[in-house]
Amino acid sequence: MRAVIQRVSRASVAIDGKIHSQIGMGLLVLLGIEDADTAEDIEWLSGKIVNLRIFDDNNGVMNESVKDKNGEILLISQFTLHASTKKGNRPSYIKASKPDIAVPLYEKMIQQLSTDMGKEIGTGIFGADMKVELLNDGPVTIIIDTKQRE
């Protein structure tokens, strides 16, 4: 799994011109899923996301998590995170999972993040044409790949 995590003041996702989900202060998470991803990847990544200390404490130091701040999470599926640009100029998405594998894993990630946060999270709709708006706070953007745990 590959995630692009952005600290936001607000974010929303619209589908067919209507707001589907929106959050205030928190994290916008773009999630790419590949066939090799497992339940262990979901648990590990969810734990990382909710506990990342990228929000300012009272001293202005990034020392608090979205959970500490009682913030929100908006999770959006994005297969293009697994684009391969090795050859030519047209990206290949062969590493991105097809819906029969990706949808159940995406749904498990929604459940895991909700459990780890102790509340529901916002989501897009898998495979939909989505318009995502955000106000990146900082900007703070973190990329995590479960296959390259550092």
Image (spheres, rainbow, N blue to C red):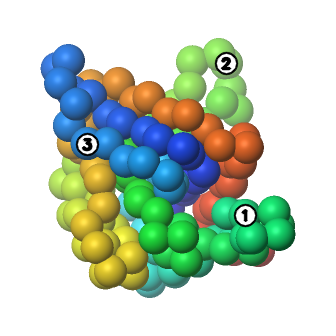
In terms of sequence position, does the residue under pointer 2 or pointer 1 come before the other?
Answer: 1
Residue 51 placed where, x, y %?
58, 77
Q: Nearer the viewer, residue 72 or 57?
A: 57
Residue that carries the numbered disc 2 in the rendered image: 88
Question: Mark 3: which secondary structure?
Answer: strand
| Identity, as a three-letter code, of the amino acid under mark 3 | Ser
The answer to which quarter of the image holds residue 111 is: bottom left
Residue 58 placed where, x, y %?
75, 70
Q: Residue at x 30, y 61 (%)?
A: 121
Mark 3 crowdedness (10 Å alpha carbons): few <14, some 14-19, many ≥20: some
| Identity, as a three-letter code, of the amino acid under mark 1 | Asp
- Say left or right for 9 vs 129: right
Whether residue 45 is visible: no
Q: Nearer the viewer, residue 84 or 41?
A: 41
Q: Residue at x 56, y 45 (%)?
A: 8
**In this rendering, the label closer to the viewer, 3 or 2:** 3
| Identity, as a three-letter code, of the amino acid under mark 2 | Gly
**In this rendering, the label closer to the viewer, 2 or 1:** 1
- Say left or right for 73 vs 48: left
In terms of sequence position, does the residue under pointer 1 or pointer 3 come before the other?
Answer: 3
